[in-house]
Image (spheres, rainbow, N blue to C red):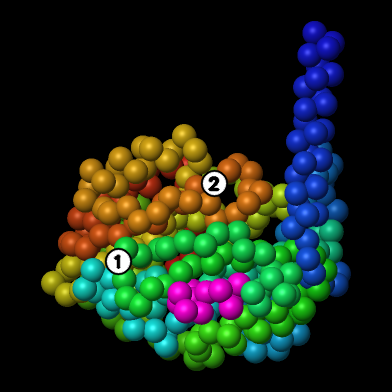
């Protein structure tokens, strides 16, 4: 019994050390002491570091370096860069940028005075290799390269981005240099979303979540119930661990839907079966991160049909996962 306890203790310490070493290996550059930093509470795993709250003003230098305005989403300084310059068709549907063509980058500060960048960039196949080269020149990692849409023109790829360290301004400059190698447009002032030709109340009831309008798209978002860590960093809800269901109205109550579901390994097959049994097409199953715990998988999907009926089918897949409606996501 004593030997078993020693072995168990050794295993836990080894796992914690692996998390720390993995995070150190992923640390290129990033920035000064965060406002409001605090130590971990007694009894918490010292290998895991909490995010800290910041204000928009704390990110002024990052915003200037990136050359585009951002906003605050709870713990995250977020900048959205929709590819409004692209005209993309999938299965005969012209894709609204807010449905599946949105580049997003988020910065989070931590109690150990470090900063994490995570993002998802939309680039054309022509832009892809140069974009990656510039990211690598600036120490910004690529953790996934994949598709979100089925047969589409022109060919578009999605690249997940990661950086961790103590100089977020340098990371923002690297991002700007990479985006400047693409056709990614400057941010435009946010306009009020127009009325949507969808029964959003019925969609909400079917999915069990309150959605919100983004441009001409209706979005419903869920987050994992578990605490999710990337290396030794606790990820705030909404960063790298969400399920999204996005509806693009097509008229007469119909919609194109695109999004992804976040799953742990044992949920993958029940989710895939639920999607197919409800007429939803599978696009890809993959990871978004390299050192997340629990290990997360994502399935991207596509469907066209009656919006409420599709929402009811998606609910069956969502219910096979351990998620809850994302708090404070409406509007």
Residue at mark 1 to residue at mark 2: CA–CA distance: 26 Å
Nearest the camera: 133 or 184?
133
Question: Residue 201 placed where, x, y %?
Answer: 27, 63
Q: Residue at x 32, y 63 (%)?
A: 150
Circle count: 2
The quarter holding residue 271 reads: top left
Question: How dense is the environment of label 1, judged by Cα within 10 Å: few (below 14), some, or many (20 and up)?
Answer: few
The segment highlighted magenta reads 122-132
User: Within the magenta stretch, is there residue 55?
Assistant: no
The vertical placement of 251 against 323, above or below, is below
Q: Looking at the image, which residue is at 23% across and 43% down?
A: 277
Can residue 52 be seen at all in this image of the molecule?
no
Name the residue: 47% across, 79% down: 126
At numbered mark 2, what does the secondary structure look like: helix, strand or loop?
loop
For residue 296, the mark is 2
Residue hosting label 1? 151
Please give left or right for residue 113 compared with residue 64 in the image.
right
- Give the label, 1 or 2, closer to the camera: 1
Question: Within the magenta stretch, is there residue 125?
Answer: yes
The x and y percentages for residue 82 are 47, 80
Tell me if residue 301 comes above or below residue 17 in the rendering. below
Residue displayed at 42% across by 40% down = 268
User: What main secondary structure does the magenta stretch of the protein show?
Assistant: helix
Above or below: residue 278 compared with residue 171: above
């Amino acid at each position: 019994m004593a030997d078993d306890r020693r072995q168990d203790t050794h295993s836990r310490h080894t796992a914690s050390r692996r998390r720390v070493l993995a995070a150190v290996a992923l640390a290129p550059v990033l920035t000064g002491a965060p406002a409001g930093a605090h130590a971990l509470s007694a009894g918490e795993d010292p290998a895991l570091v909490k995010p800290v709250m910041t204000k928009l003003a704390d990110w002024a230098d990052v915003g200037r370096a990136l050359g585009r305005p951002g906003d605050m989403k709870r713990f995250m300084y977020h900048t959205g860069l929709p590819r409004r310059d692209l005209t993309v068709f999938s299965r005969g549907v012209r894709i609204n940028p807010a449905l599946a063509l949105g580049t997003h980058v988020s910065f989070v500060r931590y109690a150990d005075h470090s900063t994490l960048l995570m993002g998802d960039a939309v680039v054309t196949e022509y832009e892809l290799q140069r974009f990656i080269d510039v990211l690598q020149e600036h120490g910004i990692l690529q953790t996934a390269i994949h598709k979100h849409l089925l047969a589409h023109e022109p060919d578009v790829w999605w690249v997940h981005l990661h950086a961790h360290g103590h100089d977020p301004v340098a990371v923002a400059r690297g991002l700007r240099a990479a985006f400047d190698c693409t056709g990614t447009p400057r941010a435009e002032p946010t306009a009020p979303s127009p009325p949507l030709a969808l029964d959003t109340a019925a969609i909400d009831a079917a999915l069990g979540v309150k959605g919100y309008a983004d441009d001409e798209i209706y979005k419903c978002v869920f987050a994992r119930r578990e605490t999710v860590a990337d290396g030794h960093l606790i990820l705030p809800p909404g960063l790298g661990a969400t399920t999204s269901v996005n509806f693009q109205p097509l008229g007469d109550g119909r919609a194109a839907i695109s999004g992804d579901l976040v799953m742990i390994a044992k949920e993958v097959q029940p989710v895939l079966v639920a999607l197919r049994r409800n007429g939803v097409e599978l696009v890809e199953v993959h990871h978004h991160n390299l050192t997340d715990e629990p290990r997360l998988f994502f399935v991207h999907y596509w469907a066209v049909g009656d919006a409420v009926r599709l929402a009811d089918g998606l609910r069956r897949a969502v219910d096979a996962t351990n998620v809850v409606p994302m708090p404070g996501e409406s509007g």
